[in-house]
């Protein structure tokens, strides 16, 4: 059994690398009582190393919700490989739903030269990408604007979605696990994502490999099967296996091939 100091260092490391750490999970992992874990968390919190949350703790500053602007530059090549794979799935003339977010935003960029397409989205970045594409019809899901994600959420957006259906739905994620689905910082976002998934004939979650298996927040969107996870070929085989065993189809976008092909401003269809 680890010493108390060694256990606290392990707790800190887990919180930094995987996000939130719950009392129950830590108690089982280190084979100590919940009260012992709570004392450890209190000490780490007093040292300014962890922030307390309901039922656990998270590393200070390790997993704040990043703004859309911050996320756009992260995992750039991976996101664009995922976007090009997704764009190749879309058939001209289809009606598609695009979530907000940086990876789905990269997909919107790939769609600029489509000859005919109907796009619905709650994301301001998606609207901006497609605003000058006169061959693409764009419908906006209105509602309450979340400035950090630059997207509309809430009852108005949900009510509009209830009256629509789509050939394909593309959803972004802060993180995604095989067991619990999409992890987000805000419950309004997870509600909207769950509803999005129910309105599509084909559902895709676009998430680069750095997001697989993480649990940085407490809000979850659980998606009914079938759905497809589109990630990059840098994904760890063990993570991919978990999704496959859960009945989720996994597609791996080839990052090197996409990078070698050079920049794209959309595809001609």
Image (cartoon, grey):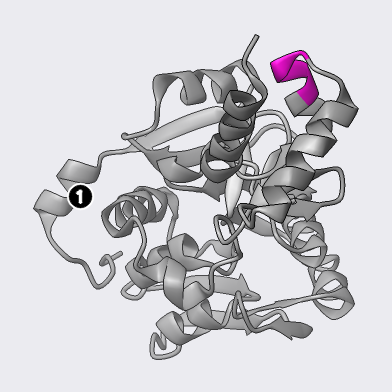
User: At which x and y percent is residue 215?
Assistant: 65, 42
**Residue at the image point whose x is 76% and y is 26% from the top:** 25
Please determine whether, in this image, residue 223 is positioned above or below residue 2: below
Q: Quadrant of the C terminus?
A: bottom left
Camera-nearest residue between 85 and 23: 23
Q: Which residue is pictured at 70% across the width and 17% down the height?
A: 30
> Which quarter shows the N terminus?
top right
* Circle 1 residue: 258
**Residue 16, image x, y percentages:** 54, 44
Is any part of residue 128 visible from this angle?
A: yes
Please name whichever residue, 164 or 174, is drawn nearer the observer in this view of the structure. 174
Span shown in magenta: 27-31
102 drawn magenta: no
| Residue 158 located left or right of residue 139 | right
Give the left or right position of residue 161, taking residue 67 as reference: right
* 29 part of magenta stretch: yes
Find residue 61 and report its horizontal and vertical position in percent: 57, 61
Percent across and percent down for residue 178 are 64, 29
Quadrant in which residue 244 is drawn: top right
Position of residue 61 in the picture relative to residue 257 (left or right): right
Q: Residue at x 76, y 13 (%)?
A: 31
Q: How many marks?
A: 1
107 or 269, nearer to the observer: 107
Q: Residue at x 86, y 50 (%)?
A: 54
């Amino acid at each position: 059994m680890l010493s108390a100091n060694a256990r606290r260092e392990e707790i800190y490391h887990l919180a930094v690398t995987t996000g939130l750490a719950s009392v129950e999970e830590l108690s089982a992992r280190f084979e100590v009582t919940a009260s012992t874990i709570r004392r450890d968390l209190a000490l780490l919190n007093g040292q300014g190393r962890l922030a307390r949350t309901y039922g656990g703790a998270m590393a200070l500053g390790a997993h704040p919700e990043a703004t859309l602007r911050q996320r756009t530059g992260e995992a750039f090549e991976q996101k664009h490989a995922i976007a090009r794979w997704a764009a190749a799935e879309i058939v001209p003339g289809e009606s598609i739903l695009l979530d907000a977010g940086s990876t789905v935003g990269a997909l919107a960029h790939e769609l600029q030269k489509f000859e005919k397409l109907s796009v619905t989205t709650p994301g301001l970045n998606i609207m901006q990408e497609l605003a000058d594409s006169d061959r693409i019809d764009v419908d906006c899901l209105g509602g309450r604007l979340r400035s950090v994600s630059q997207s509309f959420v809430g009852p108005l957006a949900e009510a509009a979605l209830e009256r629509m259906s789509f050939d394909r739905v593309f959803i972004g994620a802060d993180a995604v696990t095989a067991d619990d689905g999409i992890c987000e910082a805000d419950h309004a976002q997870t509600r909207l994502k769950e509803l999005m998934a129910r309105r599509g004939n084909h559902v895709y979650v676009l998430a680069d490999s750095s997001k697989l298996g993480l649990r940085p927040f407490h809000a979850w969107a659980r998606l009914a099967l079938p759905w497809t996870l589109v990630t990059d070929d840098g994904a760890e085989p063990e993570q991919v296996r978990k999704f496959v065993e859960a009945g989720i189809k996994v597609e791996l976008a080839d990052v090197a091939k996409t990078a070698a092909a050079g920049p794209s401003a959309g595809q001609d269809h």
